[in-house]
Structure formats: C-alpha cells, structure tokens
Image: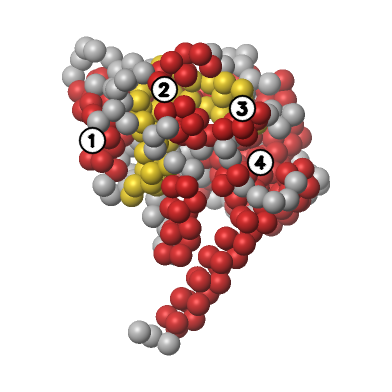
C-alpha cells in the first residue's frame, strides 16, 4: 500500500458519510428552501463551468431548432431557435434543473406510495396499472429526463415485487454500498452493467419488471439513429432484450411542471416482426427516438444528457478552432453580457 492510499481511503469514507448525512438532512427539511438552494447552486455552476455550458448550449440549440421546425414543444423552447437570449435562458434552466435533480435524488429514501399518489400524474394511468399488474415480464425504457427513477418505484408499489435496474458501479465502495442499500430499501434491485444483459433477460423470462435507460451510449456498443434530425448513437440493449425474450418495450418519460408535480407518460414501442435482426433493431431504435423526442419536447431543459456528448457532428465542430475566437460553441456564441444573468 502506498503512502497516498490511506489518505484516499479516509477521504472516500469522509465523502461517503457526508453524502449519507446530506441525504438524511434533505429528507427532513422542507422541499421549497432546498430547491431554492439548488437553483443558486445551478446558477453558480453555470458561471463556473464554461465547457459544460457551451456543450449544453450546442445541444439545446439543436433541440430548439428541431422543435421550431416541427412546431412542437413550449413557446419558450421554440423561441430559443431564433433568439440567443431565449437560448441562454434555456441553458440556464438546464443548470438549475440539474442541481434540482441531485436534491431530489438525495430525497429518494422518502418516496413512498403516498408521495407517488400526491406528486405524480400519469397519463393513461389505467393502462399503465393494467400492464404492471398483468402476468409476464415487463420491460420499461426511459431516459435521463426529469425524475426518471419514479416509474420504477411505481412498479414496486403496484406489483409488490422488486424492479430490476442496471446501474454503473461507483469507484467509491462506501458510496456504492450506500446507493445499493437505499435503493434496495425502496424495492429496487441494482445490478452491474457487466452482467446486466444476461440477468435482465432472465428476469424478464421469470416475469419480473426491468427498467433501463436508453438515451446514452455509456458502454460504447450503440447504434447510429436519427435523433432531433441528426445522427446519434443509442444503446441497442432494449431492442436486444426484446429480441431475446419476446417482451414488448414500453418507453416512458417523467418531467416536473411549474407547480412541482411530476408528469409521466408511456408509449408502447413493439419490436417489428419482419426483417433481419439488424433491421428490426434499427427500426425499433428509430421508433424509440421518436418517443424520446416527444417526451423531451415537454421540457428540454430537464434532459440531463444535454451536458454530455450526444451528436458527433456537434462535438467535431466544437473541436475545430475558430479563426476569431479559437474555439466557439456550435450552438452559437453567447450574446454579450449574458453569462451569469
């Protein structure tokens, strides 16, 4: 063991205990002042993270342009396609929603059936409940949007059985143990990404409920698909699970409205019956992307993926030096004086 290892180990334990303490406190304080603090943290992050801000601006500019072209989404989002200040406000909102998400994440242990009944409105709720209480495996596909854990918790509440969810394993063992224990207390069963495909397929065959996210290609095995009018890589996992098990995927989204109520909706996306394996997977991903677009249109600033690479062409353009600034975001320069407003 090197001299630095004990110090790192102590630091990780301190950090893990701080996270546990913060979660405990967040579950016992009123939500409104916590969200106000989150907004302040988002404002600070917006000022202090220019690369993150530029990427969010590029991604949201593409989304806003597509929404305006297809006459979808809110007036504020469509305005961001032609008005630099409106785009800046959208980016600023994305930082605030990101900070709010972490507050809500810390408050996850307090989510129970009464909370879900009070704070979550599901479109076509009767069909969702009928699906969850029917026999056989259920496959739900979501995206890093709004408060995306809530559908899994609904499944637990309605079925009385764990919902199985793949999750990245944290490098910090203490934080990983905390994550697993708190989620298991709510009825979620977390499994690592390495064994996810085999275990998820078996769980579906056994009639269990499986939830996974399909908007970010974390493992690098994604397939090119059109998303908001440009090529992006989406994970093939949901389609492959459907192929292997015969279970029809259901694509969901959950976003927070201005009153603090979560709005959830779900669309069934069957795997095409005809074509080669690759053709069926590609067709599913295209249909899945259309559902993602409809969900995100409701609240683009709540799609947490805007802080990460989505479209290779935007990333490549951002890496090309500009003759005037050296490196300008593809979403267009920020209007003078707007950073921090």
Secondary element type, mark 2? helix
Name the N-terminal-most of marks 3 and 1: 3
On screen, residue 222 above or below 175: above
Instruction: Check the image and name the residue furthest to the bottom.
Output: 3
On screen, residue 44 above or below 259: below
The reply to whether the C-beta atoms of the residues labelled 2 and 3 are less than 8 Å apart is no
Name the N-terminal-most of marks 2 and 3: 3
Local crowd size for mark 4, using a 10 Å CA cut-off: few (<14), some (14–19), many (≥20): many
Q: Is residue 1 left or right of residue 37?
A: left
Name the N-terminal-most of marks 4 and 1: 4
Foreground mark, 4 or 1, reads 1
Local crowd size for mark 1, using a 10 Å CA cut-off: few (<14), some (14–19), many (≥20): some
Scheme of image coloration: secondary structure
* Closer to us: 179 or 297: 179
Q: Which residue is mark 3?
A: 117
Local crowd size for mark 3, using a 10 Å CA cut-off: few (<14), some (14–19), many (≥20): few
Q: Which residue is mark 4?
A: 97
Local crowd size for mark 2, using a 10 Å CA cut-off: few (<14), some (14–19), many (≥20): many
Could you tell me how far apart the alpha carbons at marks 3 and 1 are, in whole angstroms? 31 Å
The reply to whether the C-beta atoms of the residues labelled 3 and 1 are less than 8 Å apart is no
Residue at image position (45%, 82%) is 6
Instruction: Classify residue 98 by image quadrant.
Output: top right
Instruction: Check the image and name the residue furthest to the left.
Output: 276
Quadrant occupied by the C terminus: top right
Could you tell me how far apart the alpha carbons at marks 2 and 3 are, in whole angstroms? 16 Å
Could you tell me how far apart the alpha carbons at marks 4 and 2 are, in whole angstroms? 29 Å
Quadrant occupied by the N terminus: bottom left
Residue at image position (65%, 30%) is 119
């Amino acid at each position: 063991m090197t001299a630095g290892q004990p110090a790192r180990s102590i630091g990780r334990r301190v950090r893990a205990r701080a996270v546990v303490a913060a979660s405990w406190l967040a579950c016992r304080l009123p939500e409104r002042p916590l969200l106000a603090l989150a907004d302040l943290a988002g404002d600070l992050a917006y000022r202090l993270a220019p690369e993150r801000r530029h990427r969010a601006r590029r991604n949201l500019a593409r989304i806003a342009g597509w929404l305006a072209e297809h006459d979808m989404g809110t007036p504020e989002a469509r305005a961001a396609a032609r008005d630099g200040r409106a785009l800046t406000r959208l980016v600023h909102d994305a930082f605030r929603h990101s900070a709010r998400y972490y507050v809500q994440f810390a408050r996850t242990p307090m989510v129970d059936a009464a909370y879900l009944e009070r704070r979550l409105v599901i479109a076509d709720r009767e069909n969702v409940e009928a699906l969850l209480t029917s026999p056989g495996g259920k496959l739900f596909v979501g995206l890093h949007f709004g408060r995306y854990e809530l559908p899994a918790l609904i499944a637990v509440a309605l079925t009385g059985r764990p919902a199985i969810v793949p999750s990245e394993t944290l490098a910090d063992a203490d934080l990983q143990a905390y994550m697993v224990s708190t989620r298991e207390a709510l009825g979620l069963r977390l499994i690592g990404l390495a064994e996810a495909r085999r275990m998820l397929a078996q769980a579906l065959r056994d009639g269990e409920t499986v939830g996974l996210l399909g908007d970010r290609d974390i493992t690098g095995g994604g397939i090119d698909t059109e998303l908001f009018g440009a090529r992006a890589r989406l994970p093939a996992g949901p389609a492959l699970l459907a192929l292997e098990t015969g279970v029809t995927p259901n694509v969901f989204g959950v976003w927070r409205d201005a009153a603090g109520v979560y709005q959830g909706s779900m669309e069934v996306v069957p795997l095409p019956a005809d074509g080669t394996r690759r053709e069926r997977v590609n067709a599913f991903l295209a249909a899945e992307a259309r559902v993602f677009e409809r969900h995100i249109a409701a609240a683009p600033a709540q799609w947490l993926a805007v802080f990460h690479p989505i479209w290779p062409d935007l990333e490549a353009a951002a890496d090309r030096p500009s003759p005037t600034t050296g490196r300008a975001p593809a979403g267009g320069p920020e209007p003078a004086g707007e950073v921090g407003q």
